[in-house]
Amino acid sequence: MRLKRNKLRDAIAFSLAASAVMLAGAGSALAQDAAEEQTATSLDTVTVTGTRIKSQTFTAASPITEINAEEFTTFGATTVEDLVNQYPQVDLSFDNFANNGAYGHATISMRGLGPERTLTLVNGRRLPFSRNEVSDPSIVPAAIVKRVDILSGGASAVYGADAVAGVVNFVLDDKFEGVSLNFGYSAYQHDNDNKYFQDLNAEAGYEAPTGNSGFDGISRNVDLVVGGSFGDNRGHAVGWLTWRENDALYHGQRDYSHCSVFFDEAVCGGSGTADPARFAVNRWDPTLNDGAGGVVPWPTGTNANYIWNGAGYENGSYVYNYAPINFYQRPDKRVTAGFMASYEINEYFEPYIEAMFLERQSDIQIAESGAFGVPVNIDCNNPLIGTLCADAGVTTPMTRVTMYKRNVEGGPRISMWDDSTHRITAGLRGNLFDSSWTYDVSLVSGKTKSIEIGKNDFLITRIAAAALGCDAGGLYGTFPGCQPYDIWTDSIDPEAAQAMAGTSFSIFKTSYRAFSAEANGYLGWGFPTADGEEIGLAVGMQRSDYSFASEYDGDSAAGNFAGAGAASLPVDASNTVNEFFFEAALPIYVGEGAFNRFDASLGYRYSDDDTSGNYDTYKLGLSSTFWDSKLLLRAGYNRAVRAPGLNDLYYTQRIALSGSGTDLCAGANPAYTAEQCARTGVPLAAYGNVTANPANQYNQQTGGNPNLAPEEADTYTIGFAVEPIENLNLSLDWYSIEIEGAIGGIGYNTIQILCMEQQLYCDRIHRDARAGEYDLWVGLASDPGVGYVDNLPGNIGIYKREGLDLAASYSFALGPGRLSTSLVGNYVLKDFTQTLASEPSTAFDCKGLVNDTFLCQTPEWRHVFTAAYSWDRYKVGMRWRYVGEMDYNDVDGTPLSDVIWLGDGVSAYNYLDLNGSVSFGQATVSLGVNNVLDKEPPFSGDSGLSANANALGGYDQVGRYVFGSISLKF
């Protein structure tokens, strides 16, 4: 689109270019050069995140961190999330290094508020939701990214719901010219020389790896981009095709993750569902429960563990080391493709299209399935169990035996994911008549489909039948293909184990369609103090349609898979949102002298949501420049919202395993008194005898709540950007985000604490007293009598996030070349959560803490510092990534000690990354090493803080990362 030249547009263009150097961002090192080259003709090509109004300077009202395209190659990032999630405004989260409980795809989360509160965009438009109802940035190829904008603070008035913590906008290079072909290769390498963990493995009888690991976790990628103009330069098209594949890396390939380590004892731990089997044996009294029969409660029943010793049964237990077979890095193969094209018919009509496609296969592998506490009632005279009753001291004719046996004969559980996503945008834009106004009408259509195939998990209904000999006339019957499963004497035929396993499937489908129409331009008048600059206005509407549907096989829906932890229940729901919005850009004062200008921006959006009703969002931004734009002051306020997702509203309530809580009254020495634990349902006689789950997984009731309302947030930013000397740019911004009515449960541990300390919500704790164990985890989730905690969600929480974002860049000539440096840092002032707004005692602040009870992991300071020196056809660089220290304290400051690996806390982590490149004509060869010093992640044992293996998430997990690429450009 060609722009008319006039004094107003020239002035706005110059102001926009001059203030661009003030914007926070790692990609701003050479911004001054860009500002000097900026002209008015480039005005209409500038896309600013955080506003729909083009051709104005008011982006300064919202601080933006920029990541430029070059950084993806420089730091070996083959996917966009690999680099973006390393920036301090974004949470440390790396999808491929999550396994059991992983999203299964990349996510982006800002300020510790979750990916559901961070809006992810491509060219200012939403990505479709994934199977988890959060955006998956995997569809964005690093090869075509022009830059990434990270906008702090809410932006719901601009983009709609979900933009609470901030916005991450991937701006694609739609004007790419030529052909680019890139071949990349990367791998990890680690020196397995951690003698401490090797000794722990040796003491447990395991052989951990030693010495140089060689290259493992290998990744390969190929990227092709082709673009060019056509139609006498009226049209332009660009297309891309990328391929990436990475190999699996296992816990067993690192000495520090080769065994699962107990969080409270320096020994290799694991699971009580082990090999050989163990049996909890109880007396069965047929006179209990009005003649229906029942277990004799502890302590008069036996309730002890017994194992087969080759001749009979004796007290004892085994612990199974499930770690080695688990994925540390999940294998992943993905292909992305797409194209963008536009053609200017005339200044009034420019049709355009943008299409993106993703195909991905990704596997999750965890330890073998098994009999995870499967109860059977059996006659003591049954020859299958031999002398078990006598050895266990059971004097009743029948016994209740709970079986724990790991399916080592059948192999690991595998979930194979196949995801396909597409997003197509088509639209028309141009000038409105012969005026300063332009219009843009577009339709976005996006769909995702995810298919999961699960293998090697036992079917619960088959375990008892096979263990009792496939007796068609017996209490537990048989099934087609059943073979006796001799769990009792550990003489198991692998074919019998295979016959007990089933194959599951899950299908998830989401769709997103948005029709929008907007117009923006100048009103033709302005404030008399604005030196002739006019007020800018954008108005528009948008209709968005969402849908989510899931489908499962019959055994999954019935909760019949032993390792699933719960039934998987289908959802089929949809929603429509109609919205109207406007934005105004107000140049209030424009003048000469030290005080150059003062601007304001306003925004308002009205949303009519079928599921959540009507809500309003709005914003106010202020900015001022001084001394020829050498100093920029900015401030902003946003009222933001997050409407509940379809699963938040409609997922069927169920009992399922949770990895984010524990039983505070379990174990020999609970932290709470017998009287306090009695409030949770533990009789005084059972105090100190409640069994803890070795795997730290407990049952909770969770699901949707159709009465949920949108969360409301107030976000504030205040900051400045300054250029004290040429090419030195500094910015500092304060942000504050406060969410009320936050959607969530009270919390597994919090419910227990409130019960024991304040006698509140005790009715939410349901212990299983039938076997006299009063546990919260033994048995099947589908069992109506199983123990659990009711943790259903509501609009009950408060979140407060507050901090400082610092950015600096400096570039200057040095010798034959140029040195460019940049720093992006974040300092946390507040990381506050109150899980229950009505109870001040549920408030806590995670700032500077790592904490197992409240799952805190918040360093006060994080930064990324980069330096690059370029001369002729050479470039070398380094990066310093810093993650600050964290104290292992309770939220009241009291030092903690139960997670022994955390000691006094986690010390600061410094990562050094080195890189270099050289050009040969049209070819560029790049090489680099991240985590040069091969630092291991901080350990937390098998506590709830462990994201994978024994380590805290977010840190470099598996050692050095070595990468290289060859790029050809024509």
Image (cartoon, rainbow, N blue to C red):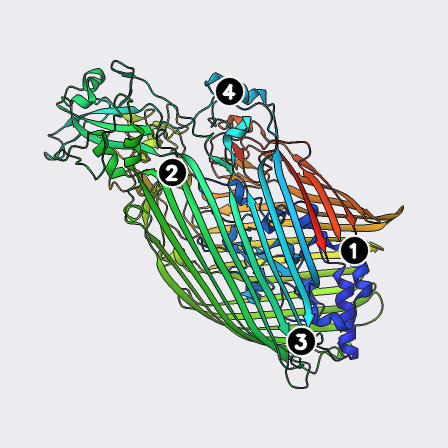
| 288 lies above or below 742 | above
* Residue farthest toward the right in the current orientation of the protein: 815
Q: Secondary structure at mark 2?
A: helix
Looking at the rendered structure, the secondary structure element under dot 1 is loop
Residue placed under numbered mark 4 in the picture: 200
Q: Residue under label 3, please give it.
A: 536
Chain-order first, disc 2 or disc 1? 1
Tag of residue 752: 2
Q: Out of 320 and 228, give the one closest to the viewer.
A: 228
Q: Residues within 10 Å of mark 2 (few under 14, many from 20)?
A: many
Q: CA gap, disc 1 to disc 4?
A: 52 Å
Is 604 left, or right, of 793 in this rendering?
right
Q: Which mark is residue 30?
A: 1
Q: Dot 3 lies on which element?
A: strand
Which tag, 3 or 1, sits closer to the chain's start? 1
Query: In the rendering, at what x and y percent does residue 232 appear?
Result: 71, 76
Residue 221 position within the rendered picture, expressed as x and y whole percent measured from the top left: 60, 47
